[in-house]
């Protein structure tokens, strides 16, 4: 074949393939389906052309391929009955069952096509497009005009697959438009006389809607509306407007009209920098009918309400970052009541931080202020919270072994202040969870350990640690808060600056035993530890802010210091003994467990001393011989698993604290049941025991339908405290979820909080949310 003929065929293929793709794919609405940026095939791409007949008419300057025409070129694949290219007019036509497969995976079908070889003008009849993500676009015709506009006539779009049994049946939902126009200058797509149909019924009609095309990453315009439902504020509809300010700044304005309270205006301004981003949120409302709220609450007493929030996150370099999250509001419950995004929790933590992360060290500097959102205008809960400014944590691990072992250094600096006391009357022992005043503590601790293997397989790990604290206390003494009501038996050091320290020498011995059989393997590992150290200094005489929560169980049985924070330190000589087991079976079963006990051997038992919150009381460690603790887990090959954590009385093995979960995961059912038992802890927490069963399950009825639910049963009060139930329908183009929940106060003082929520998601279009 002559070079001139090969060039002609290549021009024909390029014009045909690129022209068809240009007319079809570029018309896909970006918010509906993703369109690829169109590129002409590379001129040096390999061309494969097959047809029953190939005719060159040199007199008319035409080339025609007839009968089962197939063209493969630069990733494009085209099939048609007839293709003709007229060099004089510069027009190319294809007819008969045209099918084009683009490199992106889009499939384009048409009956006829007529396009110029410059792609400036063209026409496609009976257009149908299928994308790899199962979206579909059908139009009676499509044309390209003036090298600028793309026009679809009577277009229909859906993300639903056709019904296999009845392809003529309307899809679950579809969008119809009399005309779809893509403007190449403004880079917008305009849908004229558009209507949204659901189950074949028209639900929404719009005279026109204009959206950006696929070449525009961001464009100002209205977003998909959302809906809310709340007993006190009524039914609300939000119509967000997105505004592009610049390449690095944008904003969203979201007015919501509530049937009971009127117009709520929310806004969010976002700005990106080279090293981070900043978000500014604001919201405000002039409540139309505050009387719908409970009388004498913050919601009912305020008319004009609002908030502002600033959130920033920046990277100084690959290791260092800093940021903040600060929120201010007109009253103590606005953001919670109106469910403001990013500020709707019952407690909003205002914070600022600086963090550094290295290969073997970590630095974190933070400040906290806890904004308690409470409808009680006279609430003092926020004043009882600690204001933390700052808290600093620094962890360092030596890069090289020291004396053959690993050296780690941990440092913590904490400064807090509090306006009011946080005190709880609890029978014979009052709990002082927080004292008014200021408290500063600087702690630094170095730990060295090395594991040695002795003949016979015994592993010995010597452990040495040294800790020093510098403390300044300027707080009200617990006995001075309200002497007529509260009393504390400990020797509290207020208005004092002091130091304390702790040196520990420890040894851990482990002897792992491996047992292998033809169908299983087992590791049995007896473990023993001993820690020798002096008594804790000022035990119970200093504030306890970060070591109030204490649970003795299998997770901390082998910890050197079992307290949860720095304000308390474990002293005295203690031994920990236990055994760890792991088993693996060829039939898919797996077992693991830990069982052990702790022994106070000498000195002052820190868990039996006075403490502002009595952290060690009823913990199982307050006596010289502790309760038994155990953890266990069972995995089966048929989806059932059992995990548990228990503390058993040392004398009669009665359960003092139990948490066990039985779970199942299968093709059609996922479920779990958790039982929790906590014996009464009259001088630490609750004077009554807690027994609760929590269960949840999700049942897949078929590929589309599923039902789910959960419940929590307070066995002692015989009350179902929480319930959730709902169902969900899911297919390739739609997700619908309906949810009911209620939350009951076990004391029956505030009734039941009931919620109903629904969410309808149309794939590629957006969501409709109602309620919570």
Image (cartoon, grey):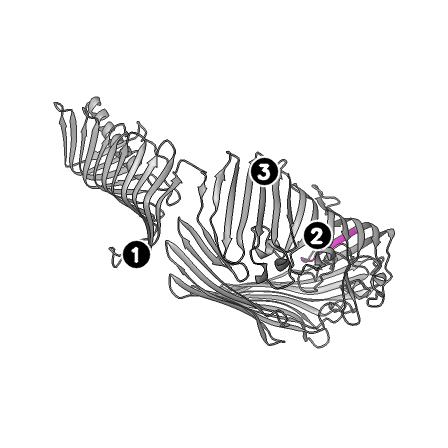
Earlier residue among tags 2 and 1: 1
Front disc: 1 or 3: 1
Earlier residue among tags 2 and 3: 3
Q: Residues within 10 Å of mark 3 (few under 14, many from 20)?
A: some
Q: Is residue 461 magenta?
A: yes
Q: Residues within 10 Å of mark 2 (few under 14, many from 20)?
A: some
- Write down the residue under mark 2: 451
Residue 696 in picture, x, y percent from top left = 51, 67
Q: CA distance from mark 2 to mark 1?
A: 72 Å
Earlier residue among tags 1 and 3: 1
Left or right of 233? Residue 181 is left
Residue 259 in picture, x, y percent from top left = 50, 57
The circle on residue 200 is 1
Q: Secondary structure at mark 2?
A: loop
Q: CA distance from mark 2 to mark 3?
A: 44 Å
Residue 508, placed above or below residue 625: above
Left or right of 226? Residue 45 is left
Q: Are marks 2 and 1 in contact (CB under 8 Å)?
A: no
Q: Which residues are magenta?
A: 456-465
């Amino acid at each position: 074949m002559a070079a001139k003929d090969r060039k002609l065929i290549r021009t024909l293929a390029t014009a045909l393939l690129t022209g068809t793709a240009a007319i079809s794919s570029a018309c896909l609405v970006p918010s509906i389906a993703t369109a690829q940026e169109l590129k002409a095939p590379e001129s040096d791409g390999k061309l494969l052309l097959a047809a029953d007949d190939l005719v060159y008419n040199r007199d008319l300057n035409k080339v025609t391929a007839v009968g089962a025409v197939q063209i493969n070129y630069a990733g494009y694949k085209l099939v048609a009955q007839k293709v003709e290219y007229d060099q004089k007019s510069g027009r190319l036509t294809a007819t008969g069952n045209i099918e084009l497969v683009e490199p992106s995976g889009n499939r384009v079908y048409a009956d006829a096509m007529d396009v110029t070889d410059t792609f400036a003008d063209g026409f496609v009849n009976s257009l149908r497009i299928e994308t790899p993500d199962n979206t579909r676009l059908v139009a009676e015709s499509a044309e390209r005009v003036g090298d600028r506009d793309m026009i679809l006539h009577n277009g229909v779009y859906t993300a639903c697959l056709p019904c296999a049994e009845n392809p003529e049946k309307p899809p679950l939902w579809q969008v119809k438009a009399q005309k779809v126009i893509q403007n190449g200058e403004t880079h917008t797509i305009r849908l004229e006389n558009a209507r949204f149909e659901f189950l074949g019924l028209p639900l929404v009609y719009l005279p026109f809607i204009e959206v950006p095309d696929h070449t525009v990453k961001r464009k100002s315009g209205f977003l998909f509306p959302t809906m809310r439902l709340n007993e006190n504020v009524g039914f609300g509809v939000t119509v967000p407007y997105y505004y592009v300010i610049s390449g690095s700044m944008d904003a969203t304005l979201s007015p919501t009209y509530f049937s009971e309270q009127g117009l709520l205006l929310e806004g969010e301004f976002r700005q990106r920098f080279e090293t981070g981003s900043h978000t500014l949120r604001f919201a405000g409302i002039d409540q139309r009918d505050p009387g719908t709220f409970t009388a004498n609450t913050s919601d009912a007493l305020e008319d004009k309400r609002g908030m502002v929030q600033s959130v920033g996150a920046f990277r100084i370099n690959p290791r260092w970052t800093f940021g903040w999250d600060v929120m201010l509001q007109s009253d103590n419950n606005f953001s919670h009541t109106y469910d403001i995004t990013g500020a709707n929790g019952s407690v909003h933590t205002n914070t600022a931080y600086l963090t550094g992360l290295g290969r073997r060290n970590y630095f974190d500097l933070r400040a906290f202020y806890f904004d308690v959102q409470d409808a009680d205008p006279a609430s003092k809960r926020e004043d009882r919270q600690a204001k933390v400014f700052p808290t600093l944590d620094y962890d360092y691990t030596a890069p090289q072994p020291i004396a053959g072992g690993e050296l780690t250094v941990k440092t913590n600096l904490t400064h807090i202040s509090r306006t009011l006391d946080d005190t709880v009357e609890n029978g014979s022992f009052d709990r002082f969870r927080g004292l008014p005043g200021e408290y500063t503590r600087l702690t630094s601790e170095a730990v060295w350990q090395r594991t040695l293997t002795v003949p016979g397989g015994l592993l010995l790990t010597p452990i040495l640690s040294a800790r020093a604290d510098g403390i300044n206390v300027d707080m009200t003494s617990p006995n001075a808060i309200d002497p007529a009501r509260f009393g504390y038996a400990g020797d509290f050091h207020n208005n004092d600056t002091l130091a304390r320290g702790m040196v520990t020498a420890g040894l851990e011995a482990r002897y792992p035993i491996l047992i292998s059989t033809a169908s299983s393997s087992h590791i049995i590992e007896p473990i023993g530890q001993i820690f020798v150290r002096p008594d804790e200094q000022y035990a119970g005489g200093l504030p306890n802010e970060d070591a109030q929560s204490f649970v003795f169980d299998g997770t901390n049985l082998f910890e050197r210091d079992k307290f949860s924070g720095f304000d308390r330190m474990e002293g005295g000589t203690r031994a920990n003994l236990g055994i760890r087991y792991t088993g693996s079976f060829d039939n898919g079963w797996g077992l693991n467990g830990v069982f052990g006990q702790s022994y106070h051997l000498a000195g002052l038992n820190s868990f039996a001393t006075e403490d502002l919150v009595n952290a060690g009381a009823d913990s199982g460690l307050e006596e010289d011989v502790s309760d038994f603790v155990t953890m266990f887990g069972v995995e089966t090959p048929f989806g059932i698993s059992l995990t548990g954590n228990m503390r058993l009385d040392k004398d009669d093995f009665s359960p003092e604290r139990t948490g066990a979960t039985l779970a199942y995961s299968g093709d059609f059912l996922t479920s779990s049941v958790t039982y929790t038992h906590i014996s009464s802890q009259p001088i630490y927490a609750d004077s009554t025991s807690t027994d609760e069963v929590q269960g949840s399950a999700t049942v897949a009825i078929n590929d589309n339908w599923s039902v789910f639910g959960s419940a929590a049963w307070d066995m002692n009060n015989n009350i179902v405290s929480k319930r959730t139930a709902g169902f969900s329908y899911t297919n390739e183009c739609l997700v619908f979820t309906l949810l009911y929940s209620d939350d009951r106060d076990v004391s029956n003082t505030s009734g039941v909080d009931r919620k109903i929520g629904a969410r309808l998601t149309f794939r590629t279009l957006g969501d409709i949310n109602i309620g919570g």
